[in-house]
Amino acid sequence: MASSARPVVTASAVVDAPPAVVFDILTDPRQHPLIDGSGTVRGSTSGPPRLELGSTFGMDMRIGAPYKIRNKVVELEPDRLIAWRHVGLHRWRYELEELPADATGGTARTRVTETWDISRYPGLVQAAYHRAGVAAKIQRGIEKTLVKLSAAAEQAARKETT
């Protein structure tokens, strides 16, 4: 967990699915409302069915009132990393690390680390985010997202093996 002085909020989870399965979910913006743990992502409004570096995609959002946001993929390494940002300077990043199969020799596993990175903002803006409780709320949302992403990826991995 990040301290209030750090410009990132992050958490990790181990998913019982290979990185390619997790990556497929993250690169499909139509899946984002299903895995969002913050309760703010309401729907996918525009963009390609599979995100690539430089792709833009729109989302219906709600924090108090409904609004639309346009995101751009700014980092991408297949099956390892995807990050996007919108008009703001902060980034949402997902890093995937393949782990050995579990002890029973089952499916490959993936450590997923989700990060909300506001390091590109001046220190005063970073401090304001923390004072306003945004970072703590983001932390809770990330932790819930990882649970939902795990469930979705594990279900997709099971479908692939049947």
Image (cartoon, rainbow, N blue to C red):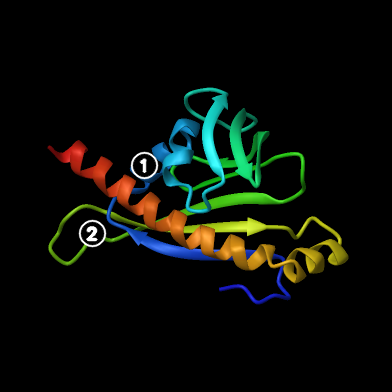
Question: Which quadrant holds residue 133?
Answer: bottom right
In percent of width and height, residue 148 lies at 38, 52
Q: Quadrant of residue 73?
A: top right
- Mark closest to the chain's N terminus, 2 or 1: 1
| Helix, strand or loop at mark 2 | loop
Q: Position of residue 95 (x, y in %)?
A: 50, 54
- Quadrant where the N terminus sits is bottom right
Callout 2 amino acid: Ala
- Looking at this view, is 98 or 9 the one in front? 9
Q: In this view, does 20 lie above or below 60?
A: below
Quick one: label 1, few (<14), some, or many (20+) residues within 10 Å?
Answer: some
Residue depicted at 47% across the width and 62% down the height: 143
Task: Look at mark 2 in the image and give the residue it sits on.
Answer: 101
> Tag 1: residue type?
Ala
Question: Mark 1 = which residue?
Answer: 20
Q: Residue 108 in the image: x percent, y percent?
A: 26, 53
**6 displayed left or right of 149:** right
